[in-house]
Image: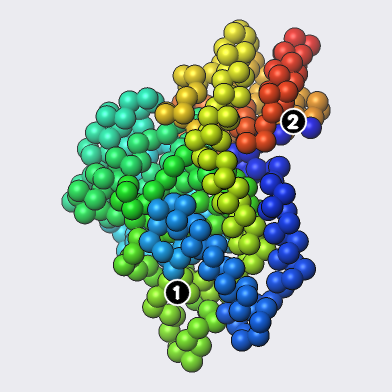
Amino acid sequence: MIYLDNSATSFIKPSSVKNAMLEAVNKYSVNPGRGNYKLSLELSEKIYETRNNISEFFGGYGAENVVFFASCTVAINQVIFSLLGDGGHVVVSDLEHNAVMRPLYKLREKGLKISFAEVCEKDKDKTLDNFRKAINKDTKLIVCTAGSNVFGIRPPFERIAALANLYGIKILVDASQAAGIIDINMRESGIDYLCFPAHKGLYGIMGLGVLMIKEGETLTPLVYGGTGVESISESQPLLPPERYESGTLNVPGIIALNEGVKFVKSKGVFRIHKWETERLKEIYYYLKGNKRVKLYTDIPDTENYLPVLSFNTDFPSERMAELYGEKGVCIRSGLHCAPVAHKKYGTLNVGTVRISPSAFTSVNDVREFIRITGQILKLN
């Protein structure tokens, strides 16, 4: 099998992540923070270690400002519904995922105004200017992806964050595709809220999302309930992370994520990004030379793109996915939950074939993918 759907979820996991999962089930099937016995206390320490490692890795504001949710989508909803629940104005990029857009569209029913800022491929100055022009006196929040899950394009989110800080506007960065692949530092960039999942570039498992909050920021909780602290109070705790973490945590996911972060740190985000980009370049050059293939972006590089590539052929994208699947190649087709990005590139009605390597994608995987692609296009 050749797996090139890592933008959806990384399939091959480091052995340390797998071992952590087993340890979580075999040794730590207890509740952290709900008991004074040894195992519960040990587990609390492991979860704290995970929060602390995440905070250090992403330049955050300490372990207490690292919050765990059931998914990155829930984390994004937490920020959006808290800050924009009573209306106002939001600026978003024209590359956003439905995890961002659907909550905003729901709040639009209650009077929220939405402005799109065009992301110009490989033109950071023009992109920044587009965000500046979209801001008005009622703007409460800027939401920007760290990289498109369809076309791999990287907006200059650090500069956009600096712009938001200048205007006194909060900024949420969706790092779903970028976490573990590019360097992100909350403090240096001035990011107020950073969201990402465990199961993509950080090589954790599905069912866990992370929200990192700037120190001093307070949100209205999305969910209320038991937190293991201040149980006598009728109100939700005031301080993070417990303020936002009602219910039992995904312990196996958290322990596995800790090992995923360690793995990425040991490899180096730049080395991972460079490796994946080089693999994607080989595919890009091959596809560019085939008259039956349509590409939508310039050749991938580490400065302007994440290692994600979309293309189409004279077959429907869904049919291409079927043909690849018959030959043991796992890719994604369709709209990838990002119709805004597809509208931008004129692919809303047809979708795209999307490929995305990982740190475990080999040179042989790429060459076999190219061979199979040639076979499919020649025989069909």
Left or right: 228 with respect to 205? left
Q: Position of residue 129 (x, y in %)?
A: 24, 33
Q: Residue at x 40, y 57 (%)?
A: 60
The amino acid beneath tag 1 is Arg
Q: CA distance from mark 2 to mark 1?
A: 42 Å
Q: Position of residue 261 (x, y in %)?
A: 56, 51
Residue 145: quadrant of the picture: top left
In the rendered view, tell whether residue 351 sits above or below residue 56: above
The amino acid beneath tag 2 is Ile
- Specify the label residue 243 is tagged with: 1
Label 2 element class: strand
> Label 1 neighbourhood size at 10 Å, few (<14), some (14-19), many (20+)?
many
**Res 272 seen here:** yes
Q: What residue is pinned by disc 2? A: 2
- Specify the label residue 13 is tagged with: none
Label 1 element class: helix
> Label 2 neighbourhood size at 10 Å, few (<14), some (14-19), many (20+)?
some
Residue 316: quadrant of the picture: top right
**Res 349 seen here:** no
Left or right: 343 with respect to 378? left
Left or right: 5 with respect to 220? right
Left or right: 186 with respect to 262? left
- The mark total stands at 2
Q: Position of residue 266 (x, y in %)?
A: 57, 45
Q: Residue at x 39, y 78 (%)?
A: 238
Identify the mark nearer the N-term, 2 or 1: 2
In the rendered view, tell whether residue 224 sits above or below residue 63: below
Q: Nearer the viewer, residue 186 or 103?
A: 186
